Amino acid sequence: MIKRKSREEIKLMRHAGHIVALVHQKMKEVVEPGISTKELDSIAMKVIKDNRAFPTFLGYNGFPACICTSINEQVVHGIPSENVVLKDGDIIAIDVGATYRGLVGDSAWSYAVGNISEENQRLMKATEEALYAGIEKMRPGNVLDDISGAVEDVAVKYGYGIVRQYGGHGVGRVMHEEPFLYNYRVGDKTLIKSGYAIAIEPMLNRGCDEVVVASDEWTVSTRDNAPSAHFEHTVVATDDGPQIMTKLME
Ligand code: MG
Ligand code: MG
């Protein structure tokens, strides 16, 4: 069952989302050639703790860090490590969750490390565009397939692969709630109601759709090693339109 969030829950989610946005603001500052993904994790942890929140990912199904760091052909769920150091020309997707007074905000962003290729700039721009096209459809009276289709149309327009095995999800009291949200049309006519909270998160690839999971049992990469980008916001459907939770509060 999909739970509608109360006004109070939405208020807390907005606070959790603000903390997630603070982490991304910091990541944007510190992502540069020479920094390790472990250092990024420590910085993210400090922002979350300083704001009296809990890093949602830490310990989730045994995940050992508070952010996921996925570089170039890695799609999602990369594990921060002191041995992974960013290089000029990399693109890195950083995914982070914060739990504040029992409510979760979840957001991912892809970042350029130094100077990146035009092809990767285009990939990142397209994936962000797909995210906002999906968000625009997060309105009471639409159905889940409207979001999925909007994401798919942007991917098709640019000629990119769409990751099939992973997608968006309901979010709130826990990170993954019903429903699952595909990044391509599947004919899901589930009606979106006011108060639904969904993490919308397109993952687009410069090559094929297929992905593989590494022997660490976490890191997901493209099968053909083509670069992948990931953008995600936690969004609530309201009668006044889509409300993004995971952005800085004014
Ligand atoms: Mg996420
Ligand atoms: Mg998510």
Image (tube, rainbow, N blue to C red):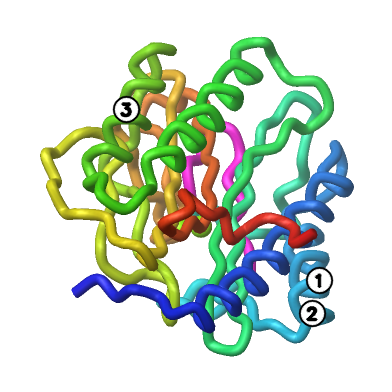
Residue visible at 73% across and 31% down in the picture: 112
Label 1: which residue? Answer: 47
Q: Residues within 10 Å of mark 3 (few under 14, many from 20)?
A: many
Left or right? Give the position of 14 relative to 63. right
* Image position, residue 116 (x, y; %): 73, 20
C-alpha separation, residue under disc 2 versus residue under disc 1: 6 Å
Per the rendered image, the range of residues in magenta is 66-76
Q: In the rendered view, does 244 fall on the left or right side of 187?
A: right
> Which secondary structure type mostly characterizes the magenta part of the structure?
strand
- Front one among 245 and 80: 245
Where residue 143 sits: x, y (%)?
22, 46
Q: Residue at image x 57%, y 46%?
A: 70
Residue 70 counted in the magenta span? yes
Residue in front for this viewpoint, 225 or 21: 21
Element marked by disc 3: helix
Residue 246 versus residue 110 in the image, above or below? below
Q: Nearer the viewer, mark 2 or mark 1?
A: 2
Q: Amino acid at mark 1?
A: Val
How far, Cα to Cα, is label 2 from label 3?
Answer: 36 Å
Instruction: Report the residue marked by disc 2.
Output: 51
User: Which three-letter amino acid code belongs to the residue tagged 3?
Assistant: Glu
Q: Residues within 10 Å of mark 1 (few under 14, many from 20)?
A: some
Label 2 beta carbon less than 8 Å to ligand 1: no
Front residue of this view, candidates 181 and 144: 144
Q: Tags 1 and 3 in contact by the CB under 8 Å rule?
A: no
Which residue, given by chain and number where applicable, does mark 3 sit on? Answer: 152
Dot 2 or dot 3, earlier in sequence: 2
